[in-house]
Amino acid sequence: MKNNIIILGAGQAGIYAAREIRQNDSKSNIKILGEENLLPYERPPLSKDFLLDKKKEEDLCFHSSDVLKNENIQFENISITKVDFENKKLFTKNDDVYIYDSLLISTGSENKKLTLNNNLKNDIYYLRNLEEAKKIKELVSNKNKITIIGGGFIGLEIASSLSQLQKKVIVIEIGNQLMGRIIPKQIADLVQNTHIEHGNEIILNKQIEKITKKNGDYEILLNDNSLIETDFIIAGIGSTPTVKLFENTNLKLDNGIVTNQFCETSIKDVYAAGDVSNFYHPLYERNMRLESYQHAQNHGICAGKNIAGVKTEYTSIPWMWSDQFNLNLQLTGICNDFDEIIERGNDINNGVIYFFLKNKIIRGACGLGIAGKIGRDIRITSKLSEKNTIVDKQILSDQNQKLNKLIQK
Amino acid sequence: MSEENWIEVGSTDSIEEEDLIRFDHQDKTFCVYKLTDGFYATDGICTHEAVHLEDGLVMDDEIECPMHQGIFNIKSGEALSPPACEDLKTYPVKVDNNKIFIKID
């Protein structure tokens, strides 16, 4: 049967869903609607290789327009302003109508903004899309002392890039460790040491009281009355799912769009995938929302299968990375639900991994190493946790013993 | 195919099955794999970012980059999973007297 399938949101989840639908359904119309006038592109390089001029705009697209043309996937640069789920219609501000049989919502997430008591909102920069990355890249070129508000992944990756561009960088974090939302303190402290070794200043446990503009520069007053002078401010203080369009509809929302393990929302024929989805994970027996490259891709693929009628449960083990300086940080599974921690390695040159176990089963692991030193072991950990394998702690803690022998085929 | 382009990598027992070793020759790095049906060789650096594949995981006929999990088919070099999108170069391999040789251009 030929259906009209609309994918609302042209990010990674959207493009991978579209291609997966086409793999399983040669007839239906597939249309991706995106708010940026760009084909879906990779975001991880924006804070790293793009700022460092190692990657250009044209290097970022997932697929060329030829690929989409060959697979008969349409892309339209349009903004949807109203949704009528009952009649399966999407509207633009000009009241153009898009009618769907199946809808995938992959609108992603958006940056939280600082709330400031003075009118400096246009003076604070954020990085999520290519346009913002271009603006930051252009403007920092003649700045010297840059302050980053928020010590999460994005803030620290920008701090690393700017340091490599010979800028003086200050990171202000409200919490008592870097990347505190998901990264264990042991690993966060190692990352912090590396930033400091490269000359970045890390300020923890401090809140911003006030930002004042003076002669084109800024003074940031912290809650211990210390004052930071800076000539450019970037904030990375977390994100929220992009759901404003659905707030006054019947779509069930709770930290994003609530979906089951098949990417199905509370409304028939409406699916959600990627950052915007608060999905049920059968292995952890709870809902979760993830913002990562691997999740956007795999969740999009899973949604695509289900939309095409291939009923598929989403069971991917969470995995994410961050690259800062020459370090590669990786996290797999969940690292905040454990009764035992096992350490493997003690030197970032060879890689350091902390395994988080509960009832003798690995729930997650977080590691840090030069380039890809920890990648294989983190990947093996994903496979072990996926199968609830009980492992020998002696092997986990001994870096001389290879973990691939633990994988049961 | 001139004989001098075959470079000795090491002995066949220097690689465990479904594993790899790194081999550096002049200014290039290669990975040599032992799969269930024989030995194979590819470039040693991921096509996505400059990271050594020697730290990656070999599963069946695939090598997964340790940094961002791009996946390549070891036999064909085909990039199978993003962020890898450019194929990995492969090299002919021969075994002679329990020694592995790869043919470098």
Image (cartoon, rainbow, N blue to C red):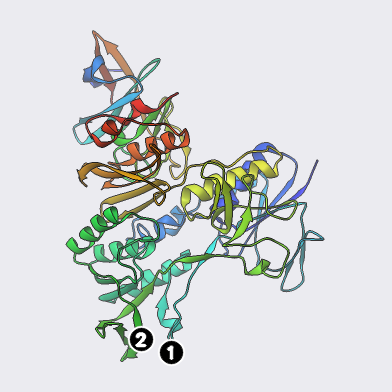
Q: Where is residue B19 in the image (x, y as percent from the top left)?
A: 32, 25
The answer to whether dots 2 and 1 both sit on one chain is yes
Query: Which structural element holds mark 1?
Result: loop
Amino acid bearing label 1: Asn
Mark 2 and mark 1: Cα distance apart in space: 9 Å
Label 2 sits on what residue type? Lys
Q: To which residue does mark 2 refer? A: A210
Does the CB distance between marks 2 and 1 fall below 8 Å?
A: yes
Of all residues, the one furthest to the top in this rendering is: B97
Q: Which residue is painted at 66% across and 68% down in the image?
A: A245
Q: Quadrant of residue B101?
A: top left
Q: Which residue is drawn at 41% across and 69% down?
A: A237
Give how far across and how far down residue A351 sits, in percent: 24, 43
Where residue A91 sits, quadrant-wise, is: bottom right
Given residues A241 and B100, the one toward you in this image is A241
User: Where does residue A313 sit, x and y in percent of width and height?
Assistant: 61, 40
User: What residue is rendered at 25% in x and 15% in y?
Assistant: B13
Q: Mark 1 points at which residue?
A: A118
